[in-house]
Image (cartoon, rainbow, N blue to C red):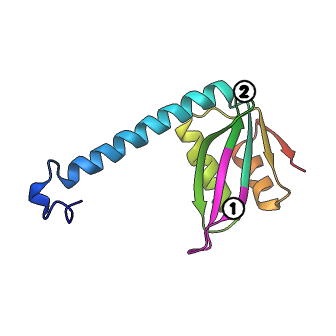
Amino acid sequence: MATEARGSQHLNFIEADCDNFIMKKHAEFLKKSKRDYALFGDAIYFNTTFKTNNYNMVCAAIVGVNNHGQSVLFGCGLLDGETTEACKWLFTVFLQAMEGREPETVFTDQAQAIAAATSKVLPNSHHRLCL
């Protein structure tokens, strides 16, 4: 934008304004995710089937379903592998963001690392496998 305006002095904002805007949008998204999770977070699906091409990191999504049958993204994270420690970290951070509320049921694939992380971090949740 500074290039298009022929210099940052011609813009009506500074870099800190951009940072504040991004943080505000992040907080708004987290607030919506918390609200959706409070309403529809009784059952979640933890999906690690996506990978990014450039860094070979696993994109792990935590998804639910709303009362209209639509998928709702509660959270996601980039993991450096599908290991027990990486999944434990993501579940722990997710629980912190959702004020410690565990889901009733967690659906995952058959990966042993995910099952181990689920039993350690979400001991009160029922773990079920997806087909």
Q: In the rendering, at what x and y percent does residue 102 appear? A: 68, 34
Q: Is residue 106 above or below residue 112?
A: above
Residue furthest right as drawn? 131
Q: Closer to us: mark 2 or mark 1?
A: 2
Majority secondary structure of magenta residues: strand
Q: In the rendering, at what x and y percent does residue 122 appear? A: 72, 42
| Numbered mark located on residue 68 in the image | 2
Q: Quadrant of the N terminus?
A: bottom left
Amino acid at pointer 1: Phe
Looking at the image, which residue is at 28% across and 45% down? Answer: 20
Q: Residues within 10 Å of mark 1 (few under 14, many from 20)?
A: few
> Could you tell me how far apart the alpha carbons at marks 2 and 1 are, in whole angstroms?
25 Å
Q: Residues within 10 Å of mark 2 (few under 14, many from 20)?
A: few
Magenta run includes residue 61: yes
14, 127: nearer the viewer: 14
7 horizontally vs 65: left or right: left
Query: Can you tell which quarter of the image residue 69 is in?
Result: top right
| Numbered mark located on residue 50 in the image | 1
Looking at the image, which residue is at 48% across and 38% down? Answer: 29
Magenta run includes residue 121: no
Q: In the rendering, at what x and y percent does residue 51 appear? A: 66, 66
- Which is nearer the N-term, disc 2 or disc 1? 1
Q: Which residues are magenta?
A: 48-62
Looking at the image, which residue is at 73% across and 30% down? Answer: 42
